Image (cartoon, rainbow, N blue to C red):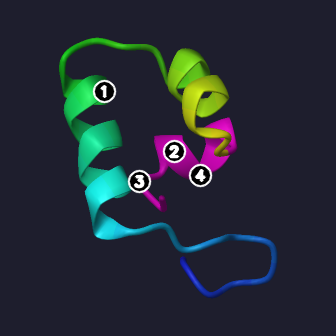
């Protein structure tokens, strides 16, 4: 999905951090506020 209009592509290091935090139970809403990434993108692992 990265590369589509309106969706940014983020560095692999940030993507891995977000994936780990999601696995550890941190909410998508709090992660989106922390990293400034839309909740929709972080839910779909498109970060």
Q: CA distance from mark 3 to mark 1?
A: 10 Å
Label 2's element? Answer: helix
Residue receiving disc 4: 41
Question: Which comes before the other along the chain, label 1 or label 4?
Answer: 1
Label 1's element? Answer: helix
Residue located farthest toward the right when viewing the structure as drawn: 6
User: Toward the viewer: 14 or 45?
Assistant: 14
Q: Find out whether the residues at labels 2 and 1 contact each other: C-beta distance under 8 Å.
A: yes
Name the side, left or right, on which 12 lies relative to 40: left
Q: CA distance from mark 2 to mark 1?
A: 9 Å
Label 4's element? Answer: helix
Name the residue rendered at 69%, 43% in the picture.
Answer: 38
Residue receiving disc 1: 22
Within 10 Å of disc 2 (Cα), the crowding (few <14, some 14-19, many 20+) is: some
Residue located farthest toward the bottom when viewing the structure as drawn: 3
Where in the figure is residue 37, as x and y percent of width and height?
A: 64, 45
Q: Find out whether the residues at labels 4 and 2 contact each other: C-beta distance under 8 Å.
A: yes
Residue 30 is covered by the magenta coloring: no
Relative to residue 11, is residue 35 depicted above or below?
above
Q: CA distance from mark 1 to mark 4?
A: 13 Å
Q: CA distance from mark 4 to mark 3?
A: 6 Å
Tag of residue 45? 3
Q: CA distance from mark 2 to mark 3?
A: 5 Å
Name the residue rendered at 67%, 40% in the picture.
Answer: 36
Residue receiving disc 2: 42
Q: Find out whether the residues at labels 2 and 3 contact each other: C-beta distance under 8 Å.
A: yes
């Amino acid at each position: 999905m990265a590369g589509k209009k309106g969706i940014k592509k983020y560095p692999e290091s940030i993507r891995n951090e977000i994936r780990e935090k999601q696995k550890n139970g941190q909410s998508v809403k709090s992660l989106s506020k922390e990293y400034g990434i839309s909740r929709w993108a972080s839910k779909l692992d498109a970060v």
